[in-house]
Image: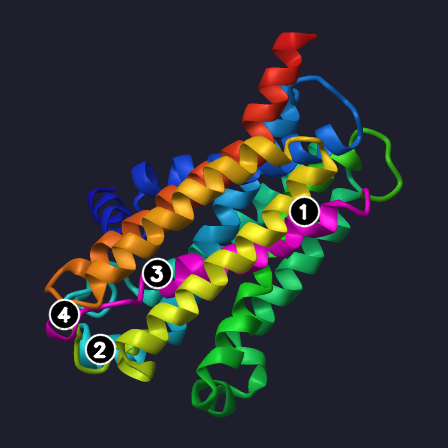
Amino acid sequence: MKRWWQYQKERFPLLAHGPLIFVFSLSAVSYSSLLRGNIALPSFSVGLTAFITCLLFFLQLRIADEFKDYDDDLAYRPYRPVPRGLIKLKELGYLVPVTLLIQAGLALWLKPQLLWFLLLVWFYWGLMWREFFVTKWLKAHPLVYLGSHMLIMPLIDLYASACDWLVGGAGHPRAALGWFLVLSFFNGIVVEVGRKLRAPTDEEKGVETYTALYGTKNASLLWLVALIVTSLAAMMAAYSIGILGGVAIVLGILVITAILLLIRFQGKKAGSGKALELFSGIWTILLYLSLGIIPLLWRVWQA
């Protein structure tokens, strides 16, 4: 257990990821509820299923990365838990069916039809694990690689939202949910690029970062464009549930903060990339809180 505890601290820190995934999953449930005009807090069973299933989705993505990156980690990042021998790939492989069974059990418990959406996420996750069977081509086209892998985000959000609308008796999601799924895709890019922006002195040999690939200015622009597109999709999603004004103010403050951080980052000061990574996480939490959980709580309180 000590080995597994150390592994999660380094590669899947629950204290960091747990709150983020909780907000991510409950926001999808809450937003779907608001779209349906159902002003009520999610039931315990709905909230638990959405959160635990999403948490395990992200754990499965981490496990897939451990397998895909093993050779590179062995060559360039031997300090990581798997290449240094703390946890073996075989042990992580044994963990996969356990997570699948838990997810399937939760879906059957809440609503058996959820299994179809679960299978959809599993199928796409499997393709990602195999790099869509075009590994060399994808790695030669980093932006295509990024986009293809971020498509898992709206699929996960679709599953989480189905815990509301499908369980609530709706035969299909509301059309406006599409804006929420679009923002999930681009926000995934914000987080992924944000954690791979580094000052020149912080770059590691063999580690592909967007700053190493495209340079500081272009990589920063990529992150900012993803942030702005996410904001636009978020405002459309907010408009669909009548909360555009409040969300626009929150996003405006955050975008200005992001620009200030990017200006500081252009100075290429050592460690400045960490601020962008941290901001990406804070941005995500505030984005999802303002679109789902907070407005639902507010309307429940008003009712």
188 is within the stretch colored magenta: yes
Label 2 SS: helix
Relative horizontal placement of residue 256, taking residue 172 as reference (left or right): left
Amino acid type shown at disc 2: Leu
Mark 2 neighbour density, 10 Å: few (under 14) some (14–19) many (20 or more):
some
Amino acid type shown at disc 1: Met
* Quarter of the view holding residue 88: bottom left
Residue occupied by mark 2 = 74
Residue occupied by mark 4 = 202
Question: What residue is shown at x 28% (from left), y 80% (from top)?
Answer: 215
Residue occupied by mark 1 = 236
Q: CA distance from mark 3 to mark 1?
A: 23 Å
Amino acid type shown at disc 4: Asp
* Residue in the foreground of this view, choosing between 257 and 269: 257
Figure check: 3 above or below 212: above
**Which region shows up in magenta?**
174-201
Question: Mark 3 vs mark 1: which is more N-terminal?
Answer: 3
Q: CA distance from mark 2 to mark 3?
A: 24 Å
Question: Mark 2 vs mark 4: which is more N-terminal?
Answer: 2
Residue occupied by mark 3 = 194
